[in-house]
């Protein structure tokens, strides 16, 4: 047999998938695929009475599409099939009802799921709001966010079988009274670290937003209206939070429930951690992905015949997984086998486009996405219908959306577009439907040797077209993108676009094209450059809703990066974390004030009268702040001291974001008690002024280092980068952000939340 794998794939398999005894790998990749195929095919005999010869033939079909790297099941199936755990599903949703018993039952059940290697989604929308009454005790409720912190702590305490880290999705409806607190629940990147969070947006909210009016807040305890908020203001807060660090995402909950195949069984309230799998409470779904990069002929045509075959075999495989899996709870087993949802998706879409000669950001790419996914959905449903004839329809079929159509299916859903993470590394494919993350990157190997790894399609074309050189590959790895390298022919620069080369509109249009023909949902990250504005993010959300997407996750480049400032030796270090801050030794000398600056002065009403805040910048960014009080007087000495310290900090390399986070919200009684004052103190006013200047005048521009670190300081900075949240903690490579999770394309490290 001998499956052909890249060295990167072998590394990932050895680290995360192959069977180990006392920490030593005792399984080869061939044996892994044999184990999985045999275990899943055994269902054909054990559950459906197939003779041994037929079971063996089906096993060989399963084995073929996996070892050809044409199809991969989700990670729990690869890890656990044929082993003691035998928990094969990746996605679960648990209910959280408005009682202490239900809340802590869900925490316990989530711990069992995380231990087995699964991720969990929760809607906290049924919990009464903070400070609402608790009739049984006469006390007041602590609200959804306080309980989310308990869930988060429980996840910290459970390591997922030593192979996968715990991940949760937390969802709150936009009409919940605690929605404003929820929107900012992850304002600090150190909070709720095991959660991705999303706001469940309703059609009513979107209508109110369009009509520039208020919408109602509903207390879930009794269904009563308890207040109103401006839809525009809430939308702006969601956008602002997502612009700052990518969270919360949004899901369009009414759109999701319009496609709920079993509305008679219940309403969908939540999704799995990456948002692609809406599920009813106690449902689970097993996923798998077809490698589209393998579905192109040598002469550059889509191999529809092979794609049809692989999809049909994959649907049978995933249906068998339902019966082969041992679920953590009996309630889950019952629900899963009653609806029999599967989620067949794709990876390698970017690879397919390159082989077809189609740029990702083009109308032709959108047309190709629709053509391919509509074919997969039709084929998957046809395969499910064949299984229904052979095995019967899914038990909850009566009352489903398919019954009036007369469409008899074995599975309530068949298609999902998931982020493929490590399985795409095994298959040597681009992730999910994402564009390429990098054309080339540098891997550190033994003795600090740097190895340049180049996308195999780019390397093949570069050699074929005669512009390949090792020096060029190093240049590409340094840039990450080929767009500015003029020695590469323009048509290939157009073809090899990366996630950050692509306008957000194209990201959304590709997502919408796949969503059009996907039963469940589509996991896709809408990438923005660091310079993107809040208005850019807002436009993306509105376009996604208009185009029929079921959810949106955005990521503005660098918005989650934090860098460790390290001083002293390796044996005695002091560290502090700021956003995107360069490394300096502790005896910092601020760079000199420039002779010429440009800036703006803002007049702000404060508790003592009027405060004038002047913000000035040079080529490195904001470099100084001056304050002056109006004729009414005020705390001029304190304001002057604050502004002088801010100026020194700015010229020492401290980021605007770090200063803003420290000063904003400081409260002064003179400001707070005056209704006409929109700031909470003079320091708050100064913080807002520099942040506004940074975002609106400089367009998010961050200061550059005024000097290049050398010697020991450069070593310290390089070490700090390895601990940077933008870089992999295991190998130091830059992380790719996908649907609220991070993935390292170099070693397979992944984490959600």
Image (spheres, helix red, strand yellow):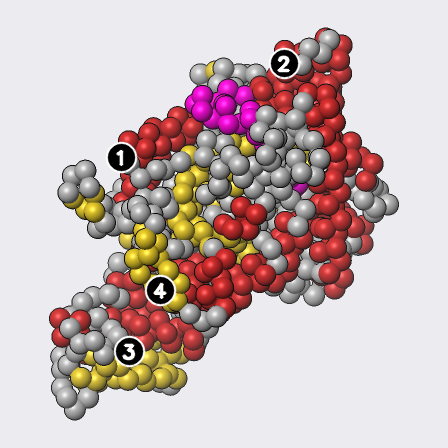
Earlier in the chain: of badge 1 and badge 4, it is 1
Q: What distance separates the C-alpha of mark 1 from that of mark 4?
A: 29 Å
* Dot 1 and dot 4 residues touching (CB under 8 Å): no
Relative to 359, residue 72 above or below: above
Q: Dot 2: within a 10 Å radius of its alpha carbon, few (fewer than 14), some, or many (20 or more) residues?
A: few
Earlier in the chain: of badge 2 and badge 4, it is 2
Relative to 337, residue 122 above or below: below
* Dot 1 and dot 2 residues touching (CB under 8 Å): no
Tally of numbered discs: 4
- Foreground: 479 or 172? 172
- Foreground: 327 or 434? 327
Earlier in the chain: of badge 3 and badge 4, it is 4
Q: What distance separates the C-alpha of mark 1 from that of mark 3?
A: 51 Å
Q: Which residues are magenta?
A: 325-347
Residue that appears at 84% across and 42% down: 298
Residue that appears at 21% across and 76% down: 675
Return the residue at label 3.
625
5 horizontally vs 725: left or right: right
- Asked whether the viewer can see residue 648, the reply is no
Relative to 642, residue 149 above or below: above
Q: Secondary structure at mark 3?
A: strand
Return the residue at label 2.
47
Q: What distance separates the C-alpha of mark 2 from that of mark 3?
A: 74 Å
Return the residue at label 4.
229
Locate residue 657: give its quadrant. Answer: bottom left
- Residue 100: mark in rendering: 1
Q: Secondary structure at mark 2?
A: loop
Q: Secondary structure at mark 1?
A: helix
Image position, residue 136 (x, y; %) = 19, 38
Image position, residue 246 (x, y; %) = 45, 55
- Foreground: 533 or 645? 533
Locate residue 407: give its quadrant. Answer: top right
């Amino acid at each position: 047999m001998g499956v052909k794998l890249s060295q990167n794939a072998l590394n990932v398999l050895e680290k995360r998938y192959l069977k180990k005894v006392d920490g030593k790998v005792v399984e080869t990749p061939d044996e892994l695929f044999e184990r999985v195929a045999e275990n899943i095919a055994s269902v054909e005999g054990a559950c459906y009475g197939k003779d041994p010869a037929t079971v063996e033939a089906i096993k060989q079909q399963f084995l073929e599409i996996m070892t050809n790297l044409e199809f991969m099941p989700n990670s729990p199936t690869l890890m656990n099939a044929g082993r003691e755990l035998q928990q094969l599903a990746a996605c679960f949703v648990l209910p959280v009802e408005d009682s202490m018993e239900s809340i802590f039952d869900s925490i316990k059940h989530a711990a069992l799921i995380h231990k087995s290697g699964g991720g969990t989604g929760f809607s906290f929308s049924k919990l009464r709001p903070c400070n609402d009454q608790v009739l049984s005790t006469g006390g007041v409720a602590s609200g959804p966010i306080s309980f989310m912190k308990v869930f988060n702590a429980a996840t910290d305490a459970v390591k997922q079988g030593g192979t996968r880290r715990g991940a949760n999705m937390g969802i709150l409806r936009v009409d919940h009274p605690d929605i404003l607190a929820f929107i900012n629940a992850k304002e600090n990147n150190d909070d709720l670290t095991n959660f991705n969070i999303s706001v469940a947006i309703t059609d009513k909210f979107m209508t109110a937003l369009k009509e520039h009016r208020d919408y109602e807040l509903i207390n879930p305890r009794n269904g009563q209206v308890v207040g109103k908020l401006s839809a525009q203001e809430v939308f702006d807060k969601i956008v602002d939070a997502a612009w700052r660090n990518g969270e919360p995402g949004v899901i369009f909950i009414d759109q999701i429930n319009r496609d709920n195949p079993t509305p008679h069984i219940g309403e969908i309230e939540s999704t799995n951690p990456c948002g692609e799998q809406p599920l009813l409470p106690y449902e689970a779904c097993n996923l798998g992905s077809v490698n589209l990069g393998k579905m192109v002929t040598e002469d550059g045509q889509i191999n529809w015949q092979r794609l049809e075959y692989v999809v049909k075999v994959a649907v049978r495989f995933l249906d068998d997984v339902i019966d082969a899996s041992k679920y953590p709870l009996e309630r889950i087993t019952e629900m899963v086998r009653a609806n029999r949802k599967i989620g067949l998706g794709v990876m390698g879409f970017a690879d397919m486009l390159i082989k077809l000669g189609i740029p990702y950001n083009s109308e032709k790419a959108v047309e190709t996405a629709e053509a391919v996914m509509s074919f997969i959905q039709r084929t998957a449903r046809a395969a499910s219908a064949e299984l229904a004839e052979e095995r019967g329809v899914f038990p909850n079929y009566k009352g489903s959306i398919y019954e009036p159509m007369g469409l008899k299916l074995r599975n309530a859903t068949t298609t999902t577009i998931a982020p493929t993470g490590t399985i795409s590394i095994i298959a040597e494919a681009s992730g999910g439907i994402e564009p390429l993350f990098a054309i080339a990157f540098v891997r550190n190997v033994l003795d600090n040797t740097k190895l340049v790894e180049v996308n195999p399609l780019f390397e093949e074309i570069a050699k074929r077209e005669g512009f390949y050189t090792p020096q060029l590959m190093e240049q590409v790895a340094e840039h990450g993108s080929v767009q500015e390298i003029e020695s590469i022919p323009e048509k290939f620069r157009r073809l090899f676009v990366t996630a950050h080369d692509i306008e957000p509109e194209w990201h959304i249009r590709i997502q919408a094209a796949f969503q059009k023909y996907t039963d469940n949902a589509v996991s896709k990250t809408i990438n923005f450059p660091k310079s993107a504005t809040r208005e850019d993010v807002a436009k993306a959300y509105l376009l996604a809703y208009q185009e029929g997407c079921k959810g949106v996750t955005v990521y503005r480049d660098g918005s989650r990066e934090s860098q460790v400032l390290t001083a002293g030796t390796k044996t005695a270090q002091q560290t502090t974390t700021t956003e995107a801050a360069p490394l300096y030794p502790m005896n910092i000398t601020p760079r000199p004030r420039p002779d010429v600056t440009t800036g703006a002065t803002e007049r702000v009403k404060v508790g003592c009268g009027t405060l004038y805040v002047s913000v000035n910048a040079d080529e490195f960014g904001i470099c100084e702040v001056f304050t002056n009080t109006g004729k009414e007087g005020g705390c001029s000495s304190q304001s002057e001291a604050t502004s002088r310290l801010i100026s020194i900090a700015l010229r020492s390399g401290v980021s605007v974001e770090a200063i803003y986070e420290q000063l904003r919200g400081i409260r002064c009684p003179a400001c707070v008690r005056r209704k006409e004052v929109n700031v909470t103190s003079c320091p708050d006013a100064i913080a807002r002024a520099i942040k506004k200047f940074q975002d609106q005048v400089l367009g998010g521009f961050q200061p550059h280092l005024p000097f290049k670190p050398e010697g020991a300081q450069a070593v310290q900075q390089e070490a700090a980068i390895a601990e940077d949240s933008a870089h992999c903690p295991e190998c130091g490579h830059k992380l790719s952000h996908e649907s609220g999770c991070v993935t390292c394309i170099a070693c397979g490290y992944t984490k959600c939340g």
